[in-house]
Amino acid sequence: MDFSIANTVLEKILRIGNIDLFSSYDKYLNYWPLLLFGFIISFLLTPLIGKFAVKVGATYKPKSRRKNKEFDNPQKAIHLQETPALGGLAITIPLLLGLIILFRLDSFILPILIGLLVLVIGSVLDDIFNLSSTVQLLYQVAAAAIIAFSVFDLSSISIFSTDLIDLQSSSWNTTIFSLPISFVFPGDLLLIIWILLCINSVKWVGGLPGLVESYTLVIILLIFVIGVRTFSLFSSTISILIAGSLISLIFYAFPPPKIMSGSSGKSIYGFLISILAIISGAKFSTTIMLLALPIVDAIYVIIYRYITYKPKNPIELMKINDTSHLHHQLFKLGFNNVSVLLIEASISLLLGSFAILSTGALRYFALIFGLASIIIFVVYINYRAKTKSDKSEDSPESKYSY
Protein backbone atom coordinates (compact mmCIF):
# COMPACT_ATOMS: atom_id res chain seq x y z
CA MET A 1 0.00 0.00 0.00
CA ASP A 2 1.56 3.29 -1.12
CA PHE A 3 0.72 6.05 1.35
CA SER A 4 3.53 8.40 0.28
CA ILE A 5 1.11 11.03 -1.06
CA ALA A 6 -0.95 10.88 2.11
CA ASN A 7 2.15 11.20 4.28
CA THR A 8 3.37 14.27 2.39
CA VAL A 9 -0.01 16.02 2.26
CA LEU A 10 -0.87 15.20 5.87
CA GLU A 11 2.45 16.52 7.12
CA LYS A 12 1.78 19.83 5.37
CA ILE A 13 -1.82 20.03 6.57
CA LEU A 14 -1.11 19.14 10.17
CA ARG A 15 1.81 21.56 10.44
CA ILE A 16 -0.65 24.40 9.93
CA GLY A 17 -1.11 24.03 13.66
CA ASN A 18 2.64 23.56 14.17
CA ILE A 19 2.10 19.87 14.91
CA ASP A 20 4.19 16.97 13.72
CA LEU A 21 2.12 14.02 12.49
CA PHE A 22 4.72 11.49 13.50
CA SER A 23 5.39 12.65 17.06
CA SER A 24 3.88 10.53 19.82
CA TYR A 25 2.73 13.62 21.72
CA ASP A 26 -0.99 14.32 21.44
CA LYS A 27 -1.24 11.77 18.66
CA TYR A 28 -5.01 11.88 18.63
CA LEU A 29 -5.24 15.67 18.47
CA ASN A 30 -2.88 15.74 15.51
CA TYR A 31 -5.76 15.05 13.16
CA TRP A 32 -7.88 18.10 14.03
CA PRO A 33 -7.43 19.80 10.59
CA LEU A 34 -8.98 16.77 8.89
CA LEU A 35 -11.88 16.84 11.35
CA LEU A 36 -12.34 20.53 10.60
CA PHE A 37 -12.11 19.93 6.84
CA GLY A 38 -14.87 17.32 6.93
CA PHE A 39 -17.03 19.52 9.16
CA ILE A 40 -16.78 22.65 7.01
CA ILE A 41 -17.36 20.91 3.66
CA SER A 42 -20.34 18.98 5.02
CA PHE A 43 -21.79 22.03 6.79
CA LEU A 44 -21.72 24.06 3.58
CA LEU A 45 -22.97 21.24 1.35
CA THR A 46 -25.90 20.01 3.45
CA PRO A 47 -28.34 22.90 2.73
CA LEU A 48 -27.55 22.66 -1.00
CA ILE A 49 -28.11 18.90 -0.95
CA GLY A 50 -31.40 19.43 0.87
CA LYS A 51 -32.63 21.82 -1.85
CA PHE A 52 -31.53 19.36 -4.55
CA ALA A 53 -33.37 16.52 -2.77
CA VAL A 54 -36.60 18.53 -2.73
CA LYS A 55 -36.16 19.39 -6.41
CA VAL A 56 -35.78 15.75 -7.49
CA GLY A 57 -38.44 14.45 -5.12
CA ALA A 58 -36.12 12.60 -2.74
CA THR A 59 -38.16 13.43 0.35
CA TYR A 60 -40.03 11.68 3.14
CA LYS A 61 -43.63 12.80 3.64
CA PRO A 62 -45.30 11.99 6.99
CA LYS A 63 -47.88 9.20 6.92
CA SER A 64 -47.57 8.58 3.17
CA ARG A 65 -45.99 5.99 0.92
CA ARG A 66 -42.98 6.99 -1.13
CA LYS A 67 -43.74 6.64 -4.85
CA ASN A 68 -46.82 4.68 -3.73
CA LYS A 69 -44.80 1.46 -3.31
CA GLU A 70 -46.57 -1.40 -1.53
CA PHE A 71 -43.62 -2.28 0.69
CA ASP A 72 -43.57 1.14 2.33
CA ASN A 73 -44.97 1.44 5.85
CA PRO A 74 -46.45 4.93 6.35
CA GLN A 75 -47.04 4.21 10.04
CA LYS A 76 -43.29 4.35 10.65
CA ALA A 77 -43.01 8.09 10.04
CA ILE A 78 -42.67 10.28 13.14
CA HIS A 79 -41.42 13.49 11.51
CA LEU A 80 -44.07 16.20 11.24
CA GLN A 81 -43.25 17.74 7.88
CA GLU A 82 -41.87 16.73 4.50
CA THR A 83 -38.13 16.19 4.99
CA PRO A 84 -35.47 15.91 2.27
CA ALA A 85 -33.31 12.80 2.10
CA LEU A 86 -29.87 12.49 0.39
CA GLY A 87 -28.15 13.79 3.53
CA GLY A 88 -25.63 10.98 3.18
CA LEU A 89 -24.09 12.86 0.24
CA ALA A 90 -22.79 15.38 2.77
CA ILE A 91 -20.62 12.54 4.06
CA THR A 92 -19.59 10.86 0.81
CA ILE A 93 -18.59 14.03 -1.06
CA PRO A 94 -15.96 15.14 1.52
CA LEU A 95 -14.86 11.49 1.76
CA LEU A 96 -14.35 11.17 -1.99
CA LEU A 97 -12.40 14.45 -2.02
CA GLY A 98 -10.22 13.18 0.82
CA LEU A 99 -9.51 9.87 -0.90
CA ILE A 100 -8.52 11.59 -4.15
CA ILE A 101 -6.41 14.34 -2.54
CA LEU A 102 -4.65 12.34 0.17
CA PHE A 103 -4.05 8.95 -1.40
CA ARG A 104 -2.66 7.53 -4.63
CA LEU A 105 -5.34 5.88 -6.77
CA ASP A 106 -3.75 2.44 -6.69
CA SER A 107 -5.07 -1.10 -6.32
CA PHE A 108 -5.81 -0.40 -2.65
CA ILE A 109 -7.82 2.81 -3.04
CA LEU A 110 -9.59 2.13 -6.36
CA PRO A 111 -11.77 -0.78 -5.13
CA ILE A 112 -12.94 1.36 -2.21
CA LEU A 113 -13.76 4.23 -4.57
CA ILE A 114 -15.57 2.00 -7.05
CA GLY A 115 -17.51 0.14 -4.37
CA LEU A 116 -18.42 3.45 -2.74
CA LEU A 117 -19.62 4.89 -6.05
CA VAL A 118 -21.77 1.80 -6.74
CA LEU A 119 -23.44 2.22 -3.36
CA VAL A 120 -23.84 5.99 -3.77
CA ILE A 121 -25.46 5.69 -7.21
CA GLY A 122 -27.74 2.84 -6.14
CA SER A 123 -28.80 4.46 -2.86
CA VAL A 124 -29.40 7.90 -4.42
CA LEU A 125 -31.68 6.24 -6.97
CA ASP A 126 -33.38 4.47 -4.07
CA ASP A 127 -33.96 7.81 -2.30
CA ILE A 128 -35.50 9.22 -5.48
CA PHE A 129 -37.45 6.24 -6.85
CA ASN A 130 -37.85 4.01 -3.76
CA LEU A 131 -36.31 0.90 -5.30
CA SER A 132 -37.44 -2.59 -4.35
CA SER A 133 -35.60 -4.56 -1.68
CA THR A 134 -34.30 -6.94 -4.37
CA VAL A 135 -32.63 -4.13 -6.32
CA GLN A 136 -31.18 -2.70 -3.11
CA LEU A 137 -29.66 -6.07 -2.26
CA LEU A 138 -28.18 -6.37 -5.77
CA TYR A 139 -26.18 -3.14 -5.60
CA GLN A 140 -25.12 -3.94 -2.03
CA VAL A 141 -23.80 -7.33 -3.19
CA ALA A 142 -22.04 -5.64 -6.12
CA ALA A 143 -20.25 -3.20 -3.80
CA ALA A 144 -19.27 -5.98 -1.39
CA ALA A 145 -18.03 -8.19 -4.26
CA ILE A 146 -15.84 -5.37 -5.62
CA ILE A 147 -14.05 -5.28 -2.26
CA ALA A 148 -13.85 -9.08 -1.96
CA PHE A 149 -12.37 -9.52 -5.47
CA SER A 150 -9.73 -6.83 -4.87
CA VAL A 151 -6.51 -6.89 -2.86
CA PHE A 152 -8.65 -6.98 0.30
CA ASP A 153 -8.27 -10.68 0.98
CA LEU A 154 -9.66 -12.00 4.25
CA SER A 155 -7.16 -14.84 4.36
CA SER A 156 -7.12 -14.97 8.16
CA ILE A 157 -8.70 -13.34 11.18
CA SER A 158 -7.62 -12.76 14.75
CA ILE A 159 -10.36 -13.17 17.34
CA PHE A 160 -8.93 -12.65 20.83
CA SER A 161 -5.15 -12.79 20.53
CA THR A 162 -2.38 -12.69 17.94
CA ASP A 163 -3.23 -16.26 16.91
CA LEU A 164 -4.72 -16.31 13.41
CA ILE A 165 -7.49 -18.48 12.01
CA ASP A 166 -6.66 -19.53 8.45
CA LEU A 167 -9.47 -18.75 5.97
CA GLN A 168 -7.64 -19.59 2.76
CA SER A 169 -8.20 -23.13 1.56
CA SER A 170 -7.95 -22.01 -2.08
CA SER A 171 -7.28 -18.79 -4.00
CA TRP A 172 -7.74 -17.28 -7.45
CA ASN A 173 -5.68 -14.44 -8.90
CA THR A 174 -5.62 -12.52 -12.19
CA THR A 175 -5.46 -8.96 -13.52
CA ILE A 176 -7.98 -6.80 -15.41
CA PHE A 177 -6.65 -3.61 -17.03
CA SER A 178 -3.52 -3.90 -14.83
CA LEU A 179 -5.72 -4.00 -11.73
CA PRO A 180 -5.03 -7.09 -9.57
CA ILE A 181 -8.03 -9.33 -8.93
CA SER A 182 -7.88 -11.78 -6.06
CA PHE A 183 -10.32 -14.05 -4.26
CA VAL A 184 -9.62 -16.48 -1.44
CA PHE A 185 -12.07 -19.11 -0.28
CA PRO A 186 -13.79 -19.17 2.17
CA GLY A 187 -12.36 -15.91 3.56
CA ASP A 188 -13.60 -13.52 0.88
CA LEU A 189 -17.02 -15.15 0.84
CA LEU A 190 -17.22 -14.40 4.56
CA LEU A 191 -16.04 -10.86 3.78
CA ILE A 192 -19.00 -10.34 1.41
CA ILE A 193 -21.39 -11.63 4.07
CA TRP A 194 -19.72 -9.41 6.69
CA ILE A 195 -20.05 -6.27 4.56
CA LEU A 196 -23.72 -7.02 3.79
CA LEU A 197 -24.40 -7.66 7.48
CA CYS A 198 -22.79 -4.34 8.44
CA ILE A 199 -24.62 -2.39 5.71
CA ASN A 200 -28.05 -3.67 6.67
CA SER A 201 -27.66 -3.80 10.45
CA VAL A 202 -26.47 -0.17 10.50
CA LYS A 203 -29.11 0.80 7.93
CA TRP A 204 -31.84 -0.60 10.15
CA VAL A 205 -30.66 1.65 13.00
CA GLY A 206 -31.90 4.62 10.95
CA GLY A 207 -35.43 4.40 12.25
CA LEU A 208 -35.71 7.90 13.63
CA PRO A 209 -34.10 11.28 12.97
CA GLY A 210 -30.51 11.61 14.11
CA LEU A 211 -30.14 8.05 15.41
CA VAL A 212 -28.10 6.41 12.64
CA GLU A 213 -25.89 9.53 12.32
CA SER A 214 -25.18 9.62 16.08
CA TYR A 215 -24.57 5.88 16.26
CA THR A 216 -22.23 5.95 13.26
CA LEU A 217 -20.31 8.89 14.74
CA VAL A 218 -19.66 6.90 17.93
CA ILE A 219 -18.41 3.84 16.01
CA ILE A 220 -16.30 5.88 13.58
CA LEU A 221 -14.60 7.72 16.45
CA LEU A 222 -13.83 4.39 18.16
CA ILE A 223 -12.38 3.08 14.89
CA PHE A 224 -10.29 6.27 14.71
CA VAL A 225 -8.86 5.48 18.16
CA ILE A 226 -8.05 1.92 17.04
CA GLY A 227 -6.47 3.22 13.82
CA VAL A 228 -4.18 5.60 15.70
CA ARG A 229 -3.19 2.91 18.20
CA THR A 230 -2.39 0.40 15.45
CA PHE A 231 -0.62 3.02 13.28
CA SER A 232 -3.12 2.59 10.47
CA LEU A 233 -2.71 5.86 8.57
CA PHE A 234 -5.55 5.18 6.14
CA SER A 235 -8.07 4.13 8.79
CA SER A 236 -7.30 6.98 11.18
CA THR A 237 -7.27 9.59 8.41
CA ILE A 238 -10.51 8.55 6.76
CA SER A 239 -12.39 7.89 10.00
CA ILE A 240 -11.65 11.33 11.47
CA LEU A 241 -12.62 12.97 8.17
CA ILE A 242 -15.94 11.10 8.24
CA ALA A 243 -16.41 12.06 11.90
CA GLY A 244 -16.11 15.75 11.07
CA SER A 245 -18.71 15.41 8.31
CA LEU A 246 -21.06 13.48 10.60
CA ILE A 247 -20.88 16.11 13.34
CA SER A 248 -22.03 18.66 10.81
CA LEU A 249 -24.82 16.44 9.45
CA ILE A 250 -26.09 15.70 12.98
CA PHE A 251 -26.59 19.46 13.42
CA TYR A 252 -29.14 19.32 10.58
CA ALA A 253 -30.52 15.81 11.24
CA PHE A 254 -31.08 16.18 14.99
CA PRO A 255 -34.81 16.15 15.78
CA PRO A 256 -36.77 17.95 14.52
CA PRO A 257 -34.77 17.15 11.37
CA LYS A 258 -34.10 19.55 8.52
CA ILE A 259 -32.67 16.68 6.44
CA MET A 260 -32.25 12.91 6.74
CA SER A 261 -29.37 10.68 5.73
CA GLY A 262 -31.71 8.63 3.59
CA SER A 263 -30.57 5.46 1.85
CA SER A 264 -27.62 7.44 0.42
CA GLY A 265 -26.27 7.70 3.94
CA LYS A 266 -27.51 4.61 5.75
CA SER A 267 -26.13 2.23 3.12
CA ILE A 268 -22.76 3.99 3.08
CA TYR A 269 -22.21 4.08 6.85
CA GLY A 270 -22.22 0.30 7.35
CA PHE A 271 -20.05 -0.21 4.27
CA LEU A 272 -17.41 2.21 5.59
CA ILE A 273 -17.50 0.78 9.10
CA SER A 274 -16.99 -2.78 7.82
CA ILE A 275 -13.97 -1.80 5.72
CA LEU A 276 -12.33 0.61 8.18
CA ALA A 277 -12.66 -1.87 11.04
CA ILE A 278 -10.73 -4.46 9.01
CA ILE A 279 -8.08 -2.01 7.76
CA SER A 280 -7.53 -0.53 11.22
CA GLY A 281 -6.32 -3.91 12.46
CA ALA A 282 -9.14 -4.38 14.96
CA LYS A 283 -9.55 -7.97 16.13
CA PHE A 284 -12.76 -9.67 15.11
CA SER A 285 -14.01 -9.74 18.69
CA THR A 286 -13.46 -5.97 18.96
CA THR A 287 -15.33 -5.32 15.72
CA ILE A 288 -18.25 -7.49 16.84
CA MET A 289 -18.51 -5.48 20.06
CA LEU A 290 -18.42 -2.19 18.15
CA LEU A 291 -21.44 -3.38 16.15
CA ALA A 292 -23.06 -5.51 18.84
CA LEU A 293 -26.22 -3.44 19.29
CA PRO A 294 -27.34 -3.21 15.62
CA ILE A 295 -26.26 -6.79 14.83
CA VAL A 296 -28.16 -8.30 17.77
CA ASP A 297 -31.17 -6.11 17.02
CA ALA A 298 -31.08 -7.11 13.33
CA ILE A 299 -30.86 -10.83 14.16
CA TYR A 300 -33.69 -10.51 16.67
CA VAL A 301 -35.90 -8.72 14.14
CA ILE A 302 -35.18 -11.31 11.43
CA ILE A 303 -36.10 -14.18 13.77
CA TYR A 304 -39.20 -12.34 15.01
CA ARG A 305 -40.41 -11.56 11.48
CA TYR A 306 -39.75 -15.12 10.31
CA ILE A 307 -41.75 -16.60 13.19
CA THR A 308 -44.54 -14.02 12.95
CA TYR A 309 -45.03 -13.68 9.18
CA LYS A 310 -43.63 -17.04 7.98
CA PRO A 311 -42.20 -15.74 4.67
CA LYS A 312 -41.62 -18.30 1.91
CA ASN A 313 -38.12 -17.10 1.00
CA PRO A 314 -35.45 -14.53 1.99
CA ILE A 315 -36.77 -11.99 -0.56
CA GLU A 316 -40.19 -12.01 1.08
CA LEU A 317 -38.52 -11.68 4.46
CA MET A 318 -36.65 -8.58 3.28
CA LYS A 319 -39.89 -6.98 2.08
CA ILE A 320 -41.43 -7.08 5.55
CA ASN A 321 -41.47 -3.53 6.87
CA ASP A 322 -42.91 -3.38 10.38
CA THR A 323 -42.10 -1.64 13.66
CA SER A 324 -40.22 -4.41 15.47
CA HIS A 325 -36.79 -2.82 15.90
CA LEU A 326 -35.38 -1.83 19.28
CA HIS A 327 -36.06 1.87 18.77
CA HIS A 328 -39.71 1.04 17.95
CA GLN A 329 -40.02 -0.80 21.25
CA LEU A 330 -38.40 2.02 23.21
CA PHE A 331 -40.94 4.40 21.69
CA LYS A 332 -43.75 2.10 22.79
CA LEU A 333 -42.40 2.33 26.34
CA GLY A 334 -42.79 6.12 26.21
CA PHE A 335 -39.26 7.31 25.41
CA ASN A 336 -39.07 10.26 23.03
CA ASN A 337 -36.84 10.65 19.97
CA VAL A 338 -33.90 12.26 21.76
CA SER A 339 -34.03 9.77 24.65
CA VAL A 340 -33.90 6.77 22.29
CA LEU A 341 -31.02 8.38 20.41
CA LEU A 342 -29.03 8.91 23.62
CA ILE A 343 -29.78 5.42 24.96
CA GLU A 344 -28.60 3.56 21.85
CA ALA A 345 -25.58 5.81 21.25
CA SER A 346 -24.51 5.50 24.90
CA ILE A 347 -24.77 1.70 24.89
CA SER A 348 -22.65 1.54 21.73
CA LEU A 349 -20.08 3.91 23.21
CA LEU A 350 -19.78 1.89 26.43
CA LEU A 351 -19.46 -1.46 24.66
CA GLY A 352 -17.04 -0.08 22.06
CA SER A 353 -14.85 1.57 24.68
CA PHE A 354 -14.77 -1.64 26.70
CA ALA A 355 -13.75 -3.54 23.56
CA ILE A 356 -10.86 -1.18 22.83
CA LEU A 357 -9.54 -1.21 26.40
CA SER A 358 -9.76 -4.98 26.89
CA THR A 359 -7.06 -7.42 25.79
CA GLY A 360 -6.49 -11.19 25.78
CA ALA A 361 -8.72 -13.16 28.14
CA LEU A 362 -10.42 -9.95 29.23
CA ARG A 363 -11.56 -9.38 25.63
CA TYR A 364 -13.08 -12.87 25.60
CA PHE A 365 -15.01 -12.04 28.76
CA ALA A 366 -15.98 -8.62 27.38
CA LEU A 367 -17.34 -10.14 24.16
CA ILE A 368 -19.42 -12.81 25.88
CA PHE A 369 -20.64 -10.49 28.63
CA GLY A 370 -21.35 -7.65 26.19
CA LEU A 371 -23.29 -9.79 23.72
CA ALA A 372 -25.22 -11.50 26.51
CA SER A 373 -26.12 -8.11 28.02
CA ILE A 374 -27.32 -6.74 24.67
CA ILE A 375 -29.38 -9.86 23.95
CA ILE A 376 -31.02 -9.68 27.39
CA PHE A 377 -31.64 -5.94 26.95
CA VAL A 378 -33.23 -6.32 23.50
CA VAL A 379 -35.42 -9.25 24.58
CA TYR A 380 -36.48 -7.46 27.77
CA ILE A 381 -37.39 -4.22 25.97
CA ASN A 382 -39.41 -6.15 23.40
CA TYR A 383 -41.18 -8.07 26.15
CA ARG A 384 -42.01 -4.89 28.06
CA ALA A 385 -43.22 -3.14 24.91
CA LYS A 386 -45.41 -6.09 23.92
CA THR A 387 -46.89 -6.28 27.43
CA LYS A 388 -47.68 -2.58 27.41
CA SER A 389 -49.14 -2.81 23.91
CA ASP A 390 -51.39 -5.71 24.93
CA LYS A 391 -52.74 -3.67 27.84
CA SER A 392 -53.59 -0.69 25.69
CA GLU A 393 -53.50 -1.01 21.91
CA ASP A 394 -54.54 2.62 21.55
CA SER A 395 -52.05 4.07 24.00
CA PRO A 396 -50.75 7.63 23.42
CA GLU A 397 -47.32 6.24 22.56
CA SER A 398 -48.67 4.33 19.55
CA LYS A 399 -48.66 7.45 17.43
CA TYR A 400 -44.87 7.57 17.79
CA SER A 401 -44.35 4.15 16.19
CA TYR A 402 -41.45 4.34 13.74
Image: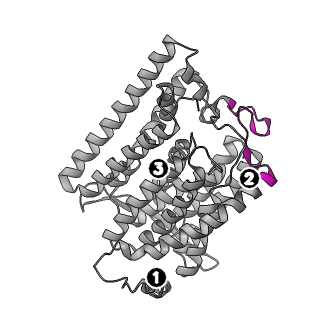
x and y, in percent, of residue 93 in the image: 63, 67
CA separation, marks 2 and 1? 33 Å
> In this picture, is 218 found above or below 324?
below
Residue at 39 percent across and 87 percent down: it is: 18
Q: Nearer the viewer, residue 8 or 365?
A: 8
Between marks 2 and 3, how big is the CA–CA gap? 24 Å
Pointer 1 or 3: first along the chain: 1
- In this view, which residue lies farthest toward the top? 391
In the rendered image, residue 211 lying in the magenta stretch gets the answer: no
Indicate whether 397 appears above or below 344: above
Residue 211 numbered mark, or none:
none
Please give left or right for residue 261 compared with residue 129 in the image. Answer: left
Q: Give the labeled residue for mark 3.
A: 215
Q: Which residue is mark 1?
A: 3
Which residue type does callout 1 highlight?
Phe
Quadrant in which the N terminus appears: bottom left
Point out the frontmost of discs 2 and 3. Answer: 3
Asked whether the residues under the numbered discs 2 and 1 touch, taking CB atoms below 8 Å apart as contact, a structural biologist would say: no
Left or right: where 11 falls relative to 22:
right
In which quadrant will I find the C terminus?
top right
Q: Element at badge 1?
A: loop
Say which element carries label 2.
helix
Which amino acid type corresponds to the residue marked 3 in the rendered image?
Answer: Tyr
Residue carrying label 2: 125
Instruction: Tell me which label, 2 or 3, sits earlier in the chain.
Output: 2
Residue 72 x/y as whole percent: 70, 34
Q: State whether residue 362 is above or below residue 221.
A: above
Q: Is residue 395 visible?
A: yes
Q: Where residue 357 sits in the image (x, y, percent)? A: 25, 57
